[in-house]
Image (cartoon, coloured by chain):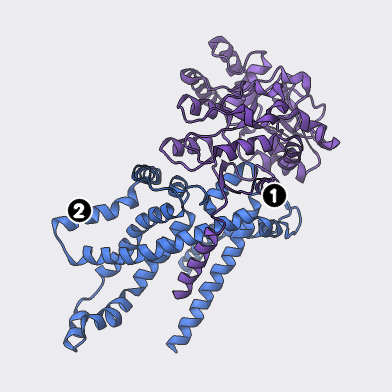
Amino acid sequence: MKSVLLMMVTLLALCGCEKDKPVLHLYTWSDYIKPELVQQFEAEQGCRVVMDFFDSNEAMFAKLKAGATGYDLIFPSSYMVAIMQQQNMLQPLDHSRLPNLKHIDPVYLRFTEDEAMHHSVPYMVSNAGIGYLKSRVADFEPSWTMFGRADLAGRMTLLNDMRETLGAALKTLGYSLNTVNEQELTEARDLVIAWKRNIAKFETDQYKNGLVSAEFLLVHGYNGDIQQTMEENEDIGYALPREGGSIASDDMVIPQGAQQVELAHAFIDFIHRPEVAAQNIAYVYFLSPNLAAYALLPDEVRADPTIFVPQELLGKCEPIRDLGADNALYSKIWDQIKAAD
Amino acid sequence: MRRCAAFRLITALCLLFLYLPIVILVVNSFNASRFGSVWGGFSLHWYRALLANERVWQALVNTLLVALVATLVATVLGTLAAFALHRYHSRWQQLHYALVYAPLVVPDVLLGMSLLLLFVHLGVSLGLTTIMLAHTSFCISYVAMVVLARLQDFDFSIIEAAQDLGAGWWTILWRVFLPLLAPGILAGSLLAFTLSLDDFVISFFTAGPGSTTLPIQIYSMMRHGTPPVINALSTLLLVLTFAVVFAVQRLTKGKLQ
């Protein structure tokens, strides 16, 4: 028992060292930044960076809303940034401390909820598209209509997510994926029901396993997930359909009550230094929307369709926006889809 | 004889159901592929990645620290509570029983959220200490219930016999009462340790900056991280647990002889 106590005291003492340095607390997703970059920032600023992690925007929001403090920089998704801003939980950003914001790719600002970067700066963007086995899918076309192909019946999955899957159908029909027009949604419903009869199932978690083991030949999924499967199986390809799709952004925000506002600004600026952003893209394999960084990337990354959305498709993509009360409309349509045989 | 075989089959199936997931986890920790659905060949890749992953180790240290402190405190307080509940029967003890019992049935989300609100209102800064306090509070209940069950079978005439033989209360406590109660206390504290080790919800709400525990780390890794690293870590913990159990068995055996 004594030795246990001794060990604990030693550990506590270890935790307590370096107390004199300022500490920047990040609240983020696990494995979402290149560790060497954090060390570089620590060395440059003479500070310590402590990272804590959350597993969903909603859980993070609930915790902060209840009054949890101590975090200086948070990385929520854009729709959650909008909610946090409505609740006055964020600090306005001081652009004079953020000279590197000039590098931010303006094209991608459209996919955030704060185009002027008043209180949030985009960190990484992701999209949802189609992953498929190149050797097993004949005549692949980058189109959502693949889900209607009879020769792939029973070997495909769509995301079990009402906004993503209805969004894919709405895009196929040429409508906005944030529409609240009931006629358009009814058309989309009928299209998804037709797809439903042709696919194996709606699947959000296990489609990666299914694609790697060739149980599924074609899946609706997120670019980051498909990228992971590609490392295992070179036969896997990824494409964003020509009709367009959803692009989502995770942003950096400074919450009210942050202790190290100056360091948090320095971190945002550091992340968007072009050479830092380029290293981060190559490591995390998501796109940090930093124009000057693109040129610094190796050619194979620059040409990777899982990271870069083709220029001509960007105009057809949209962010999934929070619809407030109109969400009920989507829920109703989604229930009808789930109930249909 | 036929019946015997049927029971054997049921036992085997139950054991399979309990241990097959663990076997799969251990096998997958050596799988070069990050997806459990295919075998990518034997590899120590995840163990190497684990060694290099400081965050996971820090989270493990946090988790063990919280579990140790919470178990120690909860074992003492829970045993005392069980004794009081067993020995005295009054209206206040009924209320006491209800209060000790409540954390077992209250959903974790409620417990976590209300503890967070309490800490915020008291102005306590969140961190390892608040997780320890939260874990202690629900661990007390588990220890108390297990020890209480043991007390209900306890023959108090043994205490009287000890008094007859001239033992003082200190001697009775250490030489008679606690040794007889020890299996219950040990079972309760092991249960508390395990529950503290894998608690996610309450930890998530009461954790502050710099106190990410292993479960929080693992859940967050699902989105961008490399969960197979956790297979490797779990396998190491499993080996450690078996080693400890084995050592304890050997040691106690030696004592008895």
Give the residue type at disc 2: Leu
Residue A106: percent from left, percent from top: 70, 22
Left or right: residue A189 compared with residue A241: left
Q: Provide the residue designation for mark 2.
A: B95
Residue occupying image coordinates x 49% and y 17%: A326
Give the residue type at disc 1: Arg
Q: Distance between the residues labelled 2 and 1?
A: 52 Å
Chain shown purple: that is A
Residue toward you, A147 or B233 = B233
Q: How crowded is mark 2: few (under 14 residues within 10 Å), some or many (20 or more)?
A: few
In the image as oriented, which residue stretches furthest toward the right? A299
Left or right: residue B94 compared with residue A67: left
Q: How crowded is mark 1: few (under 14 residues within 10 Å), some or many (20 or more)?
A: many
Q: Provide the residue designation for mark 1.
A: B34
Residue B55: percent from left, percent from top: 61, 53
Tell me, what hue is chain B? blue
Q: In which quarter of the image is residue A306?
A: top right
Whether the residues at callouts 2 and 1 have beta carbons within 8 Å, the answer is: no
Q: Judge depth for marks 2 and 1 and give the one in front.
A: 2
Instruction: Work out whether residue B6 can be spotted.
Output: yes
